[in-house]
Image (cartoon, rainbow, N blue to C red):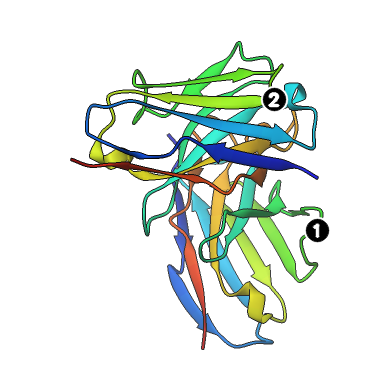
């Protein structure tokens, strides 16, 4: 059974940094692209970032470009999101998401439970 | 960037009803359209991908149709557990975008 468990969410001041982790199990992690999607309190879903299966290709939404870094450790079956220069508007639940397949790289078949990042002074 | 617009934003229905939710893309996305269900306090769950393919484990009362720019999600014979928020999402290209969501409430 696929499991994605996020951690690292916290309360941080504007301008601060945080690293989110997503521990994966139940599938061959190194074979799948992974993504981060976030959801501000009471709001809809917002796409954040993507990484391919071997980590050599990444993508960022304009709202986080140059501030967030996605990377992965296929030996540890773990996905990361390094967040810097955090803003109040980055406050959200961050979901780690698994790609359905290579053909459907932008379809998300499993989601973690989410980790809450609160940016506030 | 491709924008996704869902309608209605909310609707009320009764157990046993048939409901339809619409999603429109700002440009053609072929069949690269996915539907997700999000129950309160839970992560979204994939229901339909590639416009009309039912995800493994999703109930057969859910169905999707459409191509190009116009898509629909239909739920036949609503069950109590179906009252949730539904999101469409295009997978045509990056950046991915979600619709704003449709809240399905019990009448």
The front one of A114 and B60 is A114
**Which residue has dot 2 on it?**
A77
Residue at 75% across, 33% down: A101
Quadrant showing the N terminus of chain B:
top left
The front one of A31 and B48 is A31
Residue at 65% across, 75% down: B81
**Crowding at mark 1 (Cα within 10 Å: few <14, some 14-19, many 20+):** few
A106 left or right of B98 in image: right
Is residue B107 shown to the viewer in this render?
A: yes
A90 left or right of B1 in image: left
Q: CA distance from mark 1 to mark 2?
A: 25 Å
Q: Nearer the viewer, mark 1 or mark 2?
A: 2
Q: Is residue B15 above or below residue B6?
A: below
Give the chain letter at badge 1: B
Element under disc 1: loop
Residue B12 at x, y percent in the picture: 50, 82
Q: Is residue A97 above or below residue B18?
A: above
Element under disc 2: loop
**Which residue has dot 1 on it?**
B57
From this viewpoint, which residue is outermost toward the left? A121
The front one of A41 and B51 is A41
Q: Could you tell me if the residues under marks 1 and 2 are in contact, i.e. CB atoms within 8 Å?
A: no
């Amino acid at each position: 059974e696929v499991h994605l468990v996020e951690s690292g969410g916290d309360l941080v001041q504007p301008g601060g940094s945080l690293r989110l982790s997503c521990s994966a199990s139940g599938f061959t992690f190194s074979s799948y692209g992974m993504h981060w999607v976030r959801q501000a309190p009471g709001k809809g879903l917002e796409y954040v970032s993507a990484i391919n299966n071997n980590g050599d290709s990444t993508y960022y939404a304009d709202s986080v470009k140059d501030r967030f870094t996605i990377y992965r450790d296929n030996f540890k079956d773990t996905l990361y999101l390094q967040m810097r220069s955090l803003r109040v508007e980055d406050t959200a639940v961050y979901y780690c998401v698994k790609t359905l397949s290579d053909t459907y790289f932008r379809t998300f078949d499993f989601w973690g439970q989410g980790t809450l990042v609160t940016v506030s002074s | 960037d491709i924008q996704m617009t869902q309608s209605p934003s909310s609707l009320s229905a009764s157990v046993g009803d048939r409901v339809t939710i619409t999603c429109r893309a700002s440009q053609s996305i072929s069949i690269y359209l996915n539907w997700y269900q999000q129950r309160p306090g839970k992560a979204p769950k994939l229901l339909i991908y590639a416009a009309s393919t039912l995800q493994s484990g999703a109930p057969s009362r859910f169905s999707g149709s459409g191509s190009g720019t116009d898509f629909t999600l239909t739920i036949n014979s609503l069950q109590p557990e179906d009252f949730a928020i539904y999101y469409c999402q295009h997978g045509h290209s990056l950046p991915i975008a979600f619709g704003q969501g449709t809240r399905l409430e019990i009448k």
